[in-house]
Image (cartoon, rainbow, N blue to C red):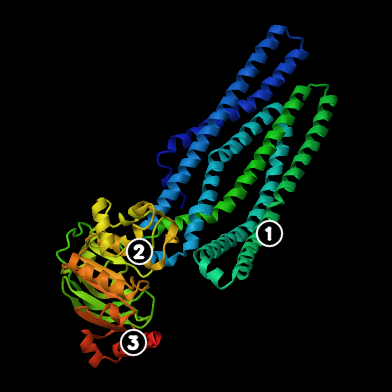
Amino acid sequence: MFKKLLKSLKGYRLPAFLTPAAIAVEVVLECIIPFVTADLVTEIENGCTLDVIVRYGLILIAMAVVSLAAGAVAGKTCSVAVAGFAKNLRRDIFARIQSFSFENIDRFSTSSLVTRLTTDVSFVTMAFGMIIRVAVRSPFMLVFAFSMAFIMGGKMAWIFVALIPFLGVGLGLVIMKAMPVFRKVFKKYDALNESVQENVKAIRVVKSFVREDYEKQKFDKASDDVRKDFTKAERILAFNNPLMQVCLHINMVFVMTFGSYLVVSSTGSALKVPQLSALLTYSFMILNSLMMISMIFVMLTLSLESCRRVTEVLDEVPTITSPENGVTEIADGSVEFDHVTFRYTGNEKVDALKDINLKIPSGATVGIIGSTGSSKSTLVQLISRLYDVSEGSVKVGGRDVREYDLKALRDGVAVVLQKNILFSGTIKENLRWGNADATDEEIVEAAKLARADEFVTQRPEGYDTYIEQGGVNVSGGQKQRLCIARALLKKPKVLILDDSTSAVDTRTDAMIRKSMREYIPSTTKIIIAQRTASVEDADFIVVMDNGRIDAVGSHAELMESNEIYRDIYISQNKAGASDNE
């Protein structure tokens, strides 16, 4: 797990290495200073000259300056390494998510991925910074301070060794109790983020149904769950400080009592006052080091679950990848489903699609209609390989889609999904998602074909109008037309409209279909619709029912022979007639 995470340190390994090196220099000098000070006091007691005092003073100043400089260097290199590691780790996680198929994304909730990219990465990088700085400083300080304590105090230094098992048992119990609580906290963080995301995304629905109070209560509950777990964890970790304080005071009492006794009883032969002073200084260093080590354990306890969650994303293997030396050219827009069966997950018992056989000639216009849940969208998602078939094959241009390079396939198959998404940026920038090199003239032409130009030009800034995140400052119909224009700019071999004209009126819908027939006659056009009017003029219509193809034929043929299609047509036309009345 840690090996996987450290791959994100690339480019920042030097500052990460320099930090512990500078810390080591700082610690060594800090430990030597009390020793030199004790020697100076001894020299003064023995009646040394001013030259000796000045020499010791200069040595102490030099060591303090170098120690300070080493600490400053460590602080700078540590901040550079931690910030760089955080940047790389977020980039690597985001890049991994971008490579996921829909199946991979379905395994993680959106809120969980957001938590992993933000909160979890913060905990991981915080722990990393503590490891390369504090986790190096504290053991170094502990070892050097122990060594100097034995040199200065002899057998009295064993008191520090005796305290370690006591501290170890106490810290072990604290960590064992706190770890399970921290594991639960992150799952509740996911729930908290999910509540926020869901509320903001559906804010119009919330307000239209006056459900603000309900949403606030739901958020408060999720927030309170996080508070309770963190309170419980902090209550456990709070034992850490009293434990250290007890050890500190035991140490102080022992050193002062027995140290003073030795100084007085041996008249300075067994232990001198400067040595006792240095021993007290080292005792503070040792206990401070132990306290810092306990903090490291606490931080690592908190971060270990974050490390696991981040690594889980990095270890996730995309279920759909480009084959080696994949085909990069699509011959034409023909599409063929050959005995296709599809299940969303390998252990799913219910088939979303069952034994689909369908041939669509290149350049044809095909309508797909059926009741809600008949797997119309699932069917077309297999064409651009958003999912892979469970059985059978899907062919585009005469080749199995699994033979194509993914980028080449998806460049050749444009999909306007049922849930239309626009990104924050200008209208022009959004349309160039279809073709990054599209000229202004090509953008305007595509917008005219999608009947988007008429409302874009009415805005003061035209194609430079800024679209808010998610396209909240345009209507549903306008959003759909912009998304269709974006797809047209790709000039694809296959164009799939997944109920993407549901928010426009029938007249505009008909004009868009007429424009597509004239502008991209050689492109295969697959139109999923709820309205029969949207597919009546198609070359043929596919009727879906419960994951199967119920019938294929023209509008007239289906009206004669297919009950499902006839019922849909009659119900819609009756509704239309009653509206007109």
Image quadrant of residue 362?
bottom left
Query: What secondary structure is marked by label 2?
Result: loop
Q: Amino acid at mark 3?
A: Asn
Pick whichever, 279 or 328, lies toward us: 328
Pick whichever, 476 or 152, lies toward us: 476
Give how far apart the Cα atoms at labels 1 and 3 are: 62 Å
Query: What secondary structure is marked by label 1?
Result: helix
Q: Which circle marks residue 232 in the picture?
A: 1
Image quadrant of residue 126?
top right
Residue drawn at x 27%, y 74% is 510
Q: Is residue 388 left or right of residue 365?
A: right
Q: Is residue 76 left or right of residue 427?
A: right
Q: Is residue 396 left or right of residue 107?
A: left
Q: Position of residue 192 (x, y in %)?
A: 57, 62
Q: Which residue is mark 2?
A: 101
Q: Which circle marks residue 210 in the picture?
A: none
Q: Position of residue 104 (x, y in %)?
A: 39, 64
Q: Position of residue 339 (x, y in %)?
A: 23, 79
Q: Amino acid at mark 2?
A: Ser
Dot 1 or dot 3: first in sequence order is: 1
- Quadrant that contains the C terminus: bottom left
Dot in front, 2 or 3: 3
Q: Which residue is mark 3?
A: 573
Pick whichever, 468 or 306, lies toward us: 468
Whether pointer 1 and pointer 3 mark residues with C-beta atoms closer than 8 Å, the reply is no
Q: Amino acid at mark 1?
A: Lys
Q: Position of residue 539 (x, y in %)?
A: 19, 78
